[in-house]
Image: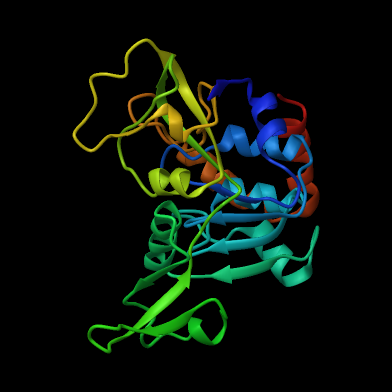
Amino acid sequence: MEFLSLKEAIAEYVEDGDVVAMEGFTHLIPFAAGHEVIRQGKRNLTLVRMTPDLIYDQLIGAGCARKLVFSWGGNPGVGSLHRFRDAVENGWPAPLEIEEHSHAAMAAAYAAGASGLPCAVFRGYAGTDLVDHNPNIRTVECPFTGETLSAVPALKPDVTVIHAQKADRRGNVLIEGIVGVQKEAVLAARKAVVTVEEVVDDLAPSSPNSVVLPAWTIDAVVEAPGGAWPSYAYGYYDRDNSFYLEWDEISRDRERFSAWMADHVFSHG
């Protein structure tokens, strides 16, 4: 485990063609790290996320993505992701392959990857037509009961990137508040980069539902205050709801999107 700048961490651990997961549910979404991926011009990435929202819209619009593996995509509480739609419908700025799953399948696939298993087996997809559109949804027969179950490949990203509240000086990471699949996504990955609000001497005290990722599960820690904005970081700052509304207008038009990216992403870092 090493402490790096954001620029150093992305340059060292994210490579063209990688399978990249950037997780965080409602808060602790790693926007700063995503922006650095865009600035460094990473290409042909397979982006994985249970709920791709604004940061993936930006990554797709910037031409970083070749494929998206996901279970829901949208601007939360607002509407569509217009750069995502433009890539799928019109191939701008590049064609985007999509692999859609249910939330249950994605969560199970991360858990399978974290457990070193080749696939996830669960009850799901009965009565849905996703099985007709996604060849990675299969069925298996339970050897004990004969029940037909669904199966999907384990998710094993080349690199997982998450944001968290704190890391101590040994590299242990604390996640508090609503916890999604960050733990599983880190444990499933070959490499893991964590941006944090602050590096502290001691992680304690923690809340009852907090998760501590020990330093041996992490490759790089980056101190990046505000690294989840415009999403929120529990205990540090609130969600910028106004920006999510603004993004709906910004992202509708290619030229306006490109101008915003030039002013707010490429000119920073």
Q: Quadrant of residue 238?
A: top left
Q: Give the farthest residue toward the top.
A: 201
Vertical position of residue 236 compared to residue 120: above or below: above
Q: Position of residue 214 (x, y in %)?
A: 38, 30
Vertical placement of 222 versus 239: above or below?
A: above
Left or right of 207 in this view: 167? right
Task: Residue lying at the far left in this picture: please name it.
Answer: 208
Q: Find residue 76 and report its horizontal and vertical position in percent.
A: 46, 53
Residue at the spot x=52%, y=60% of the render?
Answer: 79
The C terminus lies in quadrant: top right
Image point (60%, 52%), residue name: 248
How is colour applied across the structure in the image?
rainbow
Residue appearing at x 50%, y 33% in the figure: 228
Q: Examine the rendering and report whether any part of residue 26 can be seen.
A: no
Q: As displayed, is residue 148 above or below residue 1?
A: below
- The answer to whether residue 118 is seen in the rendering is yes
Question: Looking at the image, is 216 positioned above or below residue 133?
Answer: above
Which of 198 and 262 lies nearest the eye of the viewer? 198
Choose between 236 and 21: the one closer to the eye.
21
The image quadrant that residue 252 belongs to is: bottom right
Residue 55 at x, y percent in the picture:
59, 45
| Left or right position of 255 against 80 | right
Number of numbered callouts drawn: 0
Residue 17 position, x and y percent, is 74, 52
Residue that sits furthest to the front in the current view = 143
In the rendered view, does 261 fall on the left or right side of 234? right
Which residue lies at the image location 49% right of the left edge and 81% below the top edge? 130
